[in-house]
Amino acid sequence: MQLPLRLSPSILAADFADLGNEVRAISAAGADYIHVDVMDGHFVPNLTIGPAVVRALRPHTDRPFDVHLMISPVDPYVAAFAEAGADIITVHPEAGPHVHRTLQLVRGLGKRAGIAINPGTPVESVFPLLPDADLVLVMSVNPGFGGQGFIPGALDKIAALRARIDALCAGTERRIDLEVDGGINPQTAARVRAAGADVLVAGTAAFAGGRPRYEANLRALRGA
């Protein structure tokens, strides 16, 4: 069953010179999660932040930190992000030799475990991992940079995952978030929501126009 819509603004689009206040402002504007994109310049062609920044931001909001690790190898860094204050830790199946073990590691640290699917990753490849996942993240752009255009092929993956998740969770208390990241704006938000997504990651669309616009930006995404 599709869950209520939640928004996870990506601080990749925030003002890095004032991240603490940015996180406070986007939380006050109505964010449900705070999305933290971690990139290593190796697994993806960009460098962003590490556990120390997550730790520094933790006191600025009570919203769950939705940490997306675009790093390889990923296992050596999972504990550090968990200790820094991550609530959800999402990894890519390509980022380590045994992704099932990585999901178990995340859960063993008391965190929710996510698995991410790149545009070139077959959706069927993560089906065996769903029993050990709390979130599936469909990338609707190639990971590495903000501001990219939405890849429409993600819609078929979202629909396939919606059906698979619903079948797995039917008649149980099990909950698996279906999240989408990349090119999300009011227009694409409507399409991915209709396909079955229940968590939307938005960077540019959430933070555009500065703090006076944050509440209106999030309202526009929800209204779509």
Image (tube, grey):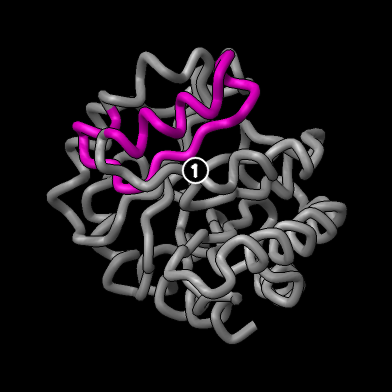
Query: Can residue 205 be spotted in the picture?
Result: no
Residue 128 falls within the magenta-colored stretch = no
Q: Amino acid at mark 1?
A: Asp
Q: Which residue occupies 37% across, 68% down?
A: 32
Q: Is residue 214 left or right of residue 71?
A: left
Q: Is residue 3 left or right of residue 110?
A: right
Q: For the residue labelled by badge 1, is the local secondary structure a helix, a strand or a loop? A: helix
Q: Which residue occupies 50% across, 46% down?
A: 133
Q: Residues within 10 Å of mark 1 (few under 14, many from 20)?
A: some
Q: Which residue occupies 58% across, 20% down?
A: 95
Q: Which residue is mark 1?
A: 132
Which is more toward the observer, 183 or 191? Answer: 191
Which is more toward the observer, 157 or 41? Answer: 157
- The quadrant of the picture occupied by the N terminus is bottom right
**Range of magenta residues:** 81-108
Query: Can residue 73 be spotted in the picture?
Result: yes
Rendering coords of residue 162 (x, y %)? 69, 65
In the image, farthest residue toward the left: 59
